[in-house]
Image (tube, grey):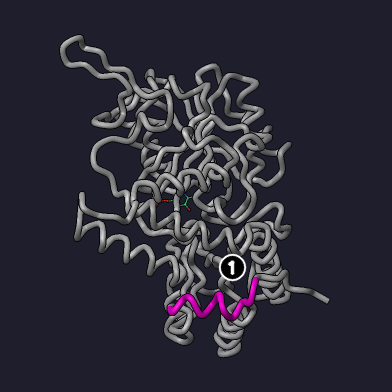
Amino acid sequence: MTTIPTLTKHETVRSLFPALETGVYLNVGTYGIMPAPALSSFLELVEEYERFGLFSTSGVHQKAEAARVALSQLLGCEATQITFTGNATDGTNLVLAGLTWQAGDEVIVTDEEHEAINHPLLYLQRSKGIRMRRIKVSPEPDVMRQHCADVASERTRLLAFSHVTCETGTRLPAAEMCLWAAERGILTLVDGAQSLGVFKTHIDDIGCDFYTGNGHKWLSGPKGTGIFYTSPARLLELSPAHVGAGSLEHANVDSGQADLWTSGRRFEFGTRATSLYAGLGYSLAWLENLGWDNIEQYIAHLSNYLKTKILARSYLHLLTPQPFAQSSGLTTFVMDAWDAGKLSQELMRRARVRVRVIPHYNAIRISTTYFNNEADVDMLIDTLDAIENEK
Ligand SMILES: Cc1ncc(COP(=O)(O)O)c(C=O)c1O
């Protein structure tokens, strides 16, 4: 018998998300939603801070710094190694714009990367003459090492990939891929947009040079929150394309001194959206209270529940690896004889089930997170059954 890992009073958790009363929300992989207590505290803080400015007593800066500490604990690194950004794509750009490129330099990426990696790289390909080398994804370490080896050359500078791919939700063997790269002097950038907050992600376990993620998906934070990590060994190799008040530790217009901070703060300058990071802190504290391990186990259970239902239907074809250890909270499938865009609209029309389309595979992607339940999955599957039975 399957037991659901306990998530403190699940009905209470769900009651804090009014969106769940209006439909079946199966797409935090695109936009997360904030739990009511975190959202209220965040809105109160924004109001107080924006109303009173320098007279504010909200402690917004201390709260943002507390969020930085919470994120560093989640990633198992020092708070000084964390840069606050606006989204995951910002982190990709900090790496790509911060490294010095020669025409002909090569970057290995997978064939399931989000625009967050593909578009800045396409731009770099056009503007600086670098070359993208694409490899197929697999959750198997040996296969990925081989794929990397097949395209590597003496011009390979960077291996950039999603920890969990946004298309099939495949969990890539990040540690093995980063080790393969490190042994060859190739830098690594890991995009954690679909993994941070789902399963334990410690930077030391991954061994990457750069890591980017966001707060607005699986961490239930406000839009406009992203994080970026650089290993201390690589920090000095990145020359920020943009600097300003806050990024230099020592600056003197008379002597010309301009020393960047030797921490993640070198990328932060000017007046920032501090209240957004404080808001993310409220969400992190609330999730912490649920327990990160509980959240991971719960998401694993719900993903398995969904995959079992998909595999039991001959008209559905699962594209995501079945074991949770090779996947995450994303599950992608194809439905026979259906255009995925039309199917997604049909799911909304019939049952207000909100999903994401993956055009590359003509597939539907489902995100199952801590606030979803088996009834959400049942509603999705029952609606698909009803559509299929009408054929
Ligand atoms: C793997 C991956 N990376 C990056 C992003 C984009 O993140 P952001 O909008 O925070 O830049 C997404 C999804 O939107 C994604 O799935």
Considering the whole magenta stretch, tell me its main secondary structure. helix
Residue 349 drawn at (x, y percent): 42, 84
| Region in magenta | 8-18
Determine which residue is flagged by label 1.
370
Circle 1 SS class? loop
Coordinates of residue 323 in the picture (x, y in percent): 73, 58
Residue at 51 percent across and 74 percent down: it is 338
**Residue 221 place in picture, x, y as percent:** 43, 59
Q: Quadrant of residue 168?
A: bottom right
195 in relation to 345, above or below: above
Q: Is residue 27 covered in magenta?
A: no
Residue 301 in view of the camera? yes
Decide: is 242 above or below 69.
above
Residue sitting nearer the eye, 322 or 360: 322
Q: Amino acid at mark 1?
A: Tyr
Query: Where 275 falls versus 78 (above or below)?
Result: below
At x 48%, y 56%, the residue is 360
Viewer-closest of 28 and 342? 28
